[in-house]
Amino acid sequence: MTISYNWLKQYIDIPESAEEIGKVLTSTGLEVEHVEHFSTVKGGLAGLVIGEVLTCAKHPNADKLSVTTVDVGSGTILPVVCGAANVAAGQKVVVAVPGTTLYPTKGEPFTIKSTKIRGEQSEGMICAEDEIGLGESHAGIMVLNTQLPNGTPASEYFNIESDYTLEIGLTPNRADAASHLGVARDIKAVCNRDVKWPAVDAFKPDNKNFAVAIEVENTEACPRYSGVTLTGVTIKESPDWLKNRLLAIGITPINNIVDITNFVLHETGQPLHAFDADQVTGKKVIVKTLPQNTPFVTLDNKERKLQATDLMICNAEEGMCIAGVFGGIKSGITENTKNVFLESAYFSPDYVRKTSLHHGLKTDASFRFERGTDPNLTVYALKRAALLIKELAGGEISSDITDIYPTKIENRTILVKDKNINRLIGKVIPRNDVTAILSRLDIEIIDSQENQFTVSVPPYRVDVVQEADVIEEVLRIYGFDNVELSAFAQSDFIAEFPEKDINKFKNTLGQLLVSNGFYEIWTNSLTNLAYQQKHNLNFTGEPVEMLNKLSEEQGILRQTMLFTGLEVCAHNINRRQKDLKLYEFGKIYYRLNGEYKEEESLALYISGNLETENWQRKTTPVSFYDMGQSIHQLLLKAGWQDVKQVTVTDPLFDYGVQLVRGNQIIGKYGKVKATLQRHFGLKQEVFYAELDTDLLFRQATPKLVVKEVPRFPEVRRDLSLVLNRSVSFEEVQKLVHATEKQLIREIITFDVYEGEKIPEGKKAYALGFTLQDDAKTLTDEEIETTMQRLMDAFEQKLGAVIRK
């Protein structure tokens, strides 16, 4: 956002230079990215003066040149050779003295030097308008009609303004500072100076001859809409002062009416829109949405298809403007406009943002509306613009202001505690200083108690919605540099961290399982005690028996999720649904030392083929390792690391492992015992896992880790080992990472063989190693050295035989 230094000084006293006030603003959070000098004409006509041609004679050595003498003030008479046909004695002209750099309308800048032209000395240049960037004509020199003394800077005659612009990196939350008055408010707060708002007391209707009715159908999208009519205006070029203000901030002047709406926008932050009132059919303005895909031609002469949520400013027959975003081609101000309907409104940021994004239209108005404007400023801005139009375009105010504001947007009240101010800022600031700062920020203290106070925040401060925001306001005005650093860095907060929700955690794990082909099941918590008795199964504690049991089949609360899950598996397999991947979140129950216990549990069941039979791949039955992969993914999702798998003898499994971290048992998984499967009529293998959901949840530490894509290539090397059957893959992994910590990125087993070709009691591992260096490309020598170290370690510590 660009702010004009000269323009800003109209609203607040600024003795500081542009660079100094830039530092002040940066200290308040309005970061001034750079300060630049600006002139309405490039170069500012520096070095150009008003001169008077005293004599003019033909050049003795050139027919088309003249030799002149020019008075440039202070008694200085310069000889100047001129090529213009219209030069004559007695003229007032624009003279570039030696050393002046000219910025022509076309071409590159050049510097005037003392020189001889065809043998005659020339100490300057009499200028045409295109040579100094004031126009396109090169028909002759500029002849001025002025009584200004010779030597007067040309910039004074042409009313060239020299200014500085401050480019502010405005953050999205500071919509209140998106104007010159908004920036002045921050200077007021930090420097304790008054802001001088332009007076609008002179506003009053001249007559009521051109009333335009206003109807707002969608008050959610348009909580406030104000309008007034002016008649008998004259559309013409804006005066220099207005054009200079707009040019300084990068806006091209168009005509006096449009320029005034742009001026008031950048003065107050309130967008305005001027309609040709004679194009408002039926003398009625309706604020509403139109049907989906309604065509509408905007000011850029493009037809756009409207969404059903696009708020429109319509007349009695059709749309005239996309509210808060862009005008229509039919109702805009033209050179023939005589009567004007002036709009000032507060539109919903959500509606404007969606419309702006959908149509790809980013305007000064939408920039402010989608961040939030001041709903209490619409009438003031309307009066300001109407008075300027009367001054610069003539005409009369021909209606009262119509102001549709059904539900006033009230100030926000926020309770602020002294202890939180001191704690978050890191310094004790006296209450009087705090209240003085807030007062200068237009934040009113409405109730004050010993240790706390309540403030009233105006709606234009859209970013101040909670206690921490109020404290931030105090800090930025008090000054970050005024808070001494403590010996130890620390941070603090007001908001409480959200409580962990086990249901959200279970939902996250469930989504992961579903994405991997699992189906959720719900089973009854009641089961049959006979399942346990028949297979001599004992679990932690005693079973909890039902006092009024419906049947023996539902006589106890389950101590394991397995039995009810196997019933589901049998039910599906008996109905030819043989490929199963099921999961259930539930509870197990028991009685221990006279107390009843219940624990959250997650059960997984897989059986049948890994995937449905298809023509692309041969189907393979699920295995113990497929269950292990699912468990691994769940643990990663929950942020559990360093979990060990310990082979365990469990009465539920033919073989299985226990999941252990430290002294905590997370769960177990394995192949369901064949005798149990037969009991449920299951002929195909079933793999079962049971995890402690409570434990998983309490110590879950999920983290999103983002790493840069490696710049250097990875290398794959394979190795075949013959080992004792008792050596686990985990032991191999540990040895690999202990031997080479830097270069080994991954180790996989792609084949395991036990059979006739290797000795009894042995097994062969086919291992794949991925090597990579973050700093460089690995050489063959480095790779072979690493692999040799690994082979030596396998042979010496695991008794391996390397198959070559």
Image (cartoon, rainbow, N blue to C red):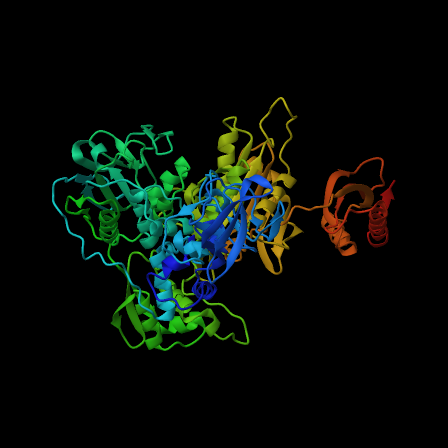
State the image coordinates of residue 319 (x, y, percent, origin top left): 27, 32
The answer to whether 771 appears left or right of 115 in the picture is right
State the image coordinates of residue 220 (x, y, percent, origin top left): 26, 44
Give the tally of numbered discs: 0
> Camera-side residue: 511 or 395?
395
The answer to whether 527 appears left or right of 395 in the picture is right
State the image coordinates of residue 328 (x, y, percent, origin top left): 31, 34
90 in relation to 136, above or below = below
610 in relation to 118, above or below = above
- The quadrant of the rendering that contains the C terminus is top right
The answer to whether 559 appears left or right of 257 in the picture is right
> Camera-side residue: 687 or 501?
501
Q: Is residue 671 visible?
A: no
Which residue sits furthest left? Answer: 208
Which residue sits furthest top? Answer: 615
State the image coordinates of residue 433 (x, y, percent, origin top left): 35, 75
The answer to whether 757 appears left or right of 292 in the picture is right
> Camera-side residue: 362 or 136?
136
| Snapshot quadrant of residue 463 | bottom left
Q: Is residue 640 visible?
A: yes
